[in-house]
Image: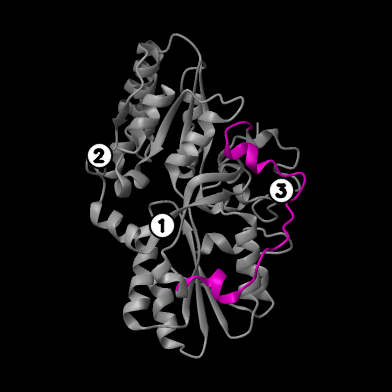
């Protein structure tokens, strides 16, 4: 398959659904890790098409959603300072902090700019030597190589006015946190293909073996997801727990090794808070000691910040697959994409945003 329509062929989808119907003999709960997959599931009605015995749980795979509130508040505090140009991907503008968001800082006169690459932030720093330029480095393993490259380039150019708030997180520790949480219901995972394009899938193999859970690396088109669900179900029904690669057109077991080398050269593994979930050991990236000069949290010396989550928001439970967005009393009422209470409603990969956008109101 090389062309987009081939990944959305309704006849092939029907064949997968028939095979699924034949394969399922008892109830199973499968989590799609990535928010992009959640949006595809909602957009194409996959949740309604699969057998009733299968329940899809939506996972924490939205980097914007899991960026901790303290770092959002620090970003807002830095962005509001004079002589600062704060750069970020567009998704982060509307993510609510304790009191306001980056969009509000921009509306109040702060120099907040949307960039499409971290290297754009380096260019802005080069063009504005009298300003401090800060980039909000958010994402999973997918964005880490480019963010690391920006630090490398700033160092090569000798820029002293560039820094990052590093909020990079790692997926495998999050899967372990879900599997070891009290009341865990996940029996199989669809792993995000783009993360594995960088990191490969060898890191999932000990997790599948230790927790006896099938993990299938899956793409983002409807047929990718249907085939991924079918592969997970076949393993569950057979009592197998292996890592399989449905996304063979993009993913190799060992991933993109030069990209991994770039990450390791600039970042080190650290414990990280996940918004709505809490701290997960070895689940984040921080700058190596050699690059401390590019750490915005060190440069701006903000210290600890008191944070305050909205009491009504259940984003944390949604991110762990414990609840659906529709279980929230504020969903579609006080909380909408225009008035988000939590990050899962504002992000393009957020589960609440997917339900709001695609769910049949009836």
Query: Which numbered disc flags the more N-terminal residue, 2 or 1?
Result: 2
Query: Which numbered disc flags the more N-terminal residue, 2 or 3?
Result: 2
Residue identified by numbered label 1: 268
The residue drawn where x is 30% and y is 27% is 12
Dot 1: element: strand
Query: Which numbered disc flags the more N-terminal residue, 3 or 1?
Result: 1
Which residue is situated farthest in the bottom direction here? 130
Disc 2 from disc 3: Cα separation: 41 Å
The residue drawn where x is 37% and y is 77% is 154
Q: Quadrant of residue 213?
A: top left
Dot 3: element: loop
Disc 2 from disc 1: Cα separation: 22 Å
Dominant SS of magenta comes to loop
Query: Is there a contact, CB below 8 Å, between mark 2 and mark 3?
Result: no
The residue drawn where x is 56% and y is 42% is 351
Q: Nearer the viewer, residue 258 or 311?
A: 258
Say which mark, if any, is on residue 175. none
In the image, residue 74 sits, relative to residue 215, either above or below, namely below
Residue 350: x percent and y percent? 55, 46
Residue 43 appears in the picture as rendered:
no
Residue identified by numbered label 2: 253
Residue 74: x percent and y percent? 63, 66
Residue 160 appears in the picture as rendered:
yes
């Amino acid at each position: 398959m090389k062309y987009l329509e081939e990944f959305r062929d309704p006849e092939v989808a029907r064949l997968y659904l028939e095979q699924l119907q034949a394969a399922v003999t008892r109830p199973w709960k499968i989590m799609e890790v990535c928010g992009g997959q959640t949006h595809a599931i909602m957009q194409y009605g996959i949740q309604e098409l699969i057998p009733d015995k299968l329940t899809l749980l939506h996972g924490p795979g939205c980097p914007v959603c899991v960026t901790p509130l303290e770092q959002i508040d620090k970003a807002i505090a830095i962005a509001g300072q004079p002589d600062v140009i704060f750069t970020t991907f567009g998704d982060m503008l509307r993510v609510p902090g304790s009191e306001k968001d980056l969009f509000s800082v921009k509306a109040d006169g702060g120099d907040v700019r949307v960039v499409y690459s971290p290297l754009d932030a380096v260019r802005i720093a080069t063009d504005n030597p009298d300003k401090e330029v800060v980039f909000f480095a958010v994402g999973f393993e997918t964005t880490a190589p480019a963010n690391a490259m920006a630090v490398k380039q700033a160092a090569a150019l000798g820029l002293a006015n560039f820094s990052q708030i590093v909020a990079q997180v790692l997926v495998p520790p999050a899967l372990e946190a879900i599997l070891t949480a009290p009341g865990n219901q996940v029996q199989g995972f669809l792993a995000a293909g783009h993360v594995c394009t960088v990191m490969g899938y060898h890191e999932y193999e000990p997790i599948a073996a230790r927790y006896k859970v099938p993990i299938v690396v899956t793409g983002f088109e409807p047929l990718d997801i249907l085939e991924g669900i079918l592969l997970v179900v076949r393993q569950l029904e057979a009592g197998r727990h292996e890592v399989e690669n449905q996304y063979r057109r993009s993913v190799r077991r060992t991933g993109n090794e030069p990209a991994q080398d770039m990450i390791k050269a600039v970042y080190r593994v650290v414990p990280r808070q996940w918004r709505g979930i809490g701290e997960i050991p070895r689940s984040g990236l921080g700058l190596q000691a050699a690059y401390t000069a590019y750490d915005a949290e060190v440069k701006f010396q903000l210290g600890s910040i008191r944070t305050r989550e909205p009491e009504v928001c259940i984003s944390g439970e949604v991110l762990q697959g414990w609840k659906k967005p529709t279980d929230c009393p504020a969903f579609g009422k006080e909380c909408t994409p225009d008035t988000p209470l939590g990050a899962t409603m504002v992000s393009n990969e957020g589960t609440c945003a997917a339900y709001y956008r695609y769910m049949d109101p009836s």
